[in-house]
Image (cartoon, rainbow, N blue to C red):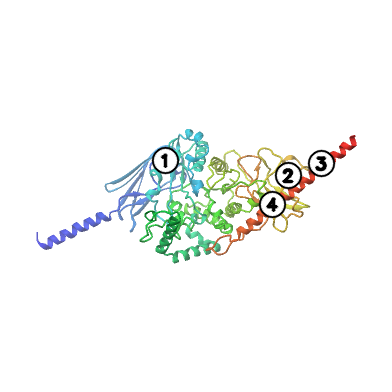
Amino acid sequence: MNRVRQHWVVIFILAGCAALADARPLKLHAIFTSHMVLQRDKPIVIWGWADAGDKVSVTFGEKAAEATAAGDTGRWEVTFPARETSTKPVMLVVSTGDEKVEMEDILIGDVWVANGQSNMAWSMAKETHADFELPQANLPLLRHFRIQTNEQATLQTDIRAEAVINGGWEVSTPETAVGFSAIGYYFGSRLQRALQIPVGVISNARGGASIESLVPAHKFNADPLAKRYAESVAKRRAAFDPRAKALEKWQRQTDRAKSKGLPKEKWPPKPVGSENLVSWDIPGKSPSDMASVYNGMFGVFKGYNIKGVIFHQGFNNALFSNCRPKLYRVLMKLMVEGWREDFNDPNLPVGVIGFCAGGNTQNEDNFEERSYEAGPFIRESQRLGLADVGDPENTAFLPAYDVQVPGLHPNKKREHGLRAARWALKRIHGMKMLWDTALLVSAKPQGDEMILTFDKRVVPDDKNSILGGFSIAGEDGKFYMAHARHRADGGSWWERTKIIHVWSPLVEKPVAVRYGWATSPMGNLKVYGHPAVPLPSFRTDNWDLPESKDFEGKAVPNYREMKKEAAERCEYRRTEEAKRTVEILKRIKTLGRRDAAGSS
């Protein structure tokens, strides 16, 4: 073989090797696996990647379609017409050249996304009622897909393989349901049983996520306050030095090790680059920063049509260092609008399960002190932000403050899932069952009382005549625990239980009322007296938290002083109550003596 011919042979061999090295194997988006549920009554879009220019054949049941892998990315996509619900398993076969991917046991039904933070991700394994519920979890028409931690600084095109739990979609059994989102399981299982159709739940909740990380990035430009926040994130990203941050973190860890008296071999190794950093350390990728969780979790499968979303989040935004209720309200609205744009459904149903009750519970001894917390302001922003969407037919705020377990992760999740299921079955599917909410129609001062009027009956579910959870304030803005009762006369009982009188001996001229105003509050009122429908916490005042306008500093800088004042107010109220009790006992004793003298 002459040298020229040898030269060209080598080139062809090397070119072939390079082509093989660059070859992109046939791949579907990670959301597609065997046992999946595809959304009924909406177009079915299937997509993935292959070598650019390759012809890709897709067979879904008896239907077939073709696409060409396009451009540098090699992305291909096919769309099949919408289908009615079906429990008959269907095969999906995708092939190109000699490559083939097969998926089986695919059903057509409703797909819901369970989004939020750790209390939505909380698994059935740790749920209070798991021992009773899991043996009943043999539900072949209920499927679950779970995405684990996958926050990203930029919007991703696919889900990392490591972030897909157990390889993808799982059929509900007593064994598999252990790992399902507890709220997602209770919600999905009740829908599946009631509707008798396949139901799929995509759990993509991220522990520690702030709402800022759950909103699509482009939506931050839709509001001046959100845009200003986004600019602060961009500023932090521009100034970020990974190496300096890594060394700073290493120094803190080393100092901690020294303070514990650990030998030098136990100290952390000095980083060469930024290898000791995690997402929390990186501006723009932190689960506290704009769009980061959305970028790697929710926004990644937006071509996969869904029925709706249930959402449960709040703890990270209810810390005084992060609590910005005005921004939260804006972001709640933008988040829902962003989802609806992503899934091309302007009426996409969204149920927001209110920030759950954790921490120390409110009681008569600590009432005023516990009233000054960030939690109720975030609940209010969740409710009002969702109302700002302007679609009460397809959205709902579902109060959760009455399910009280101390700690960041209350293990009672059944109530939340069942309430969400009630809402969806009644409002979205038109089934006959109770779900409703009550609105405050008016709040008027009358002497030393505030008179509240609601559009529906609000009574304790145990028919208790004592109404708890109210506080009242005068013009000084100082709230005290209040007494409350239904209207005693005038009209039927049905009408009188829509009207509540609120008062306190410490407030002569009341101007404002709050109800259920604590992170884990007192408050026993239910709409129609039904245990599944708590009256949402509310306030009639506009005395907001003093939010800082500086996104770089603490959100509520002077909260310690205000907490101290609230504690002092609590002590004052208890002291005054004690004095009144002593006076009453003295009067009773005096009257007893008079009666005794008269009878003698």
Question: Residue 153: x, y in percent?
Answer: 43, 58
Q: Give the mark nearer the N terminus: 3 vs 2.
A: 2
Q: Residues within 10 Å of mark 3 (few under 14, many from 20)?
A: few
Name the residue that disc number 3 marks: 588
Q: Are marks 2 and 4 in contact (CB under 8 Å)?
A: no
Q: Is residue 332 above or below residue 127?
A: below
In the drawing, does residue 460 fall left or right of residue 27? right
Q: Amino acid at mark 4?
A: Glu
Gap between marks 3 and 1 measured at Cα: 69 Å
Could you say which disc has been placed on residue 571 in the image? 4
In the drawing, does residue 586 fall left or right of residue 417? right
Quadrant position of the C terminus in the picture: top right
Q: Give the mark nearer the N terminus: 3 vs 4.
A: 4
Q: Give the mark nearer the N terminus: 4 vs 1.
A: 1
Question: Residue 472: x, y in percent?
Answer: 71, 52
Would you say residue 405 is visible in this rendering? yes
Please report the residue visible at 51 percent of the width from the left and 43 percent of the height from the top.
183
